[in-house]
Image (cartoon, grey):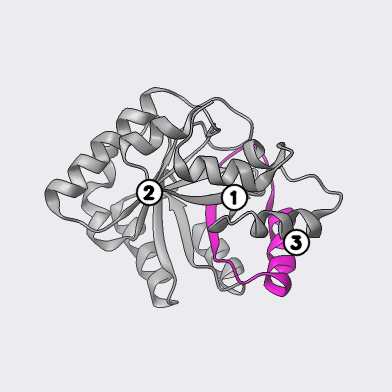
Amino acid sequence: MVEISASLLSLKSENTIQTLYNLETAKIDYFHIDVMDGEFVENDTVSRMTEYCEYLSSISNLPLDVHLMVKDVPSYISSFLVFEPNIITFHLEAAKDKVQAMEWIKLIKENNVRVGISVKPDTKIEEVAEFLPFVHLVLVMTVEPGKGGQELIPKTVEKIRALKKYVQEKQIEVDIEADGGINLETVAYVKEAGADIVVAGSAITNSENYADVVKKMKGGIQR
């Protein structure tokens, strides 16, 4: 059974607190906080995601899964540490080199937060191999990062499969998270490939019954 990290990217501005409450009672496992700076990706969601985190800090005890799609990674790590996230994930592509990526991993760990590293659809999974013993999670983007509502890119499923095989062979304990275009149809593909956590946004929030969708996603029920 996979865990569900509910993306707030497609959340409607009206009735935000009620929607957050409904998501929690639907038995999601994490709130997925998509932080975009308008530079690393086109959209800028910083103020909106900060606002959501402020709401959640007062109404929810569910863990925050913070996904940084930003250039200035250390600054945003600092900004979101105040919300005591369970995990902070940064993009490998944002680092100028491997040394810098390791510095960011250490910075997050020093603040007693779990570390995730993310790769875009065109980044080879081999590029994260050396970091796997030092992180808790690899987030495989199954769409191009930057906006919600996209369709899952089929080739990314094979990246998940290859990553799962590698970590099993090397006996590395790391979670695999899939993010982008995941709905009741596509969730089975990423689960079968080896994802431990799936990020779903509009597939849940655009539905009439959040709990039903979450239950079906966890159980891998298709169509």
> Which is nearer the eye, 120 or 148?
148
Left-right relation of 114 to 146: left
Q: CA distance from mark 3 to mark 2?
A: 28 Å
Disc 2 residue type?
Asp
Q: Who's the residue at 54% across and 37% down the image?
A: 145
Give the magenta-colored segment's residue range. 40-68
Q: CA distance from mark 1 to mark 3?
A: 16 Å
Q: CA distance from mark 1 to mark 2?
A: 14 Å
Residue 173's disc is none
Q: Which residue is mark 3?
A: 51
Left-right relation of 183 to 93: right
Q: Which residue is mark 1?
A: 6
Residue 107 in magenta stretch = no
Disc 1 residue type?
Ala
Q: Earlier in the sequence, mark 3 or mark 2?
A: 3
Q: Are marks 3 and 2 in contact (CB under 8 Å)?
A: no
Query: SS for tag 2?
Result: loop
Q: Which residue is mark 2?
A: 196
Q: Residues within 10 Å of mark 2 (few under 14, many from 20)?
A: some
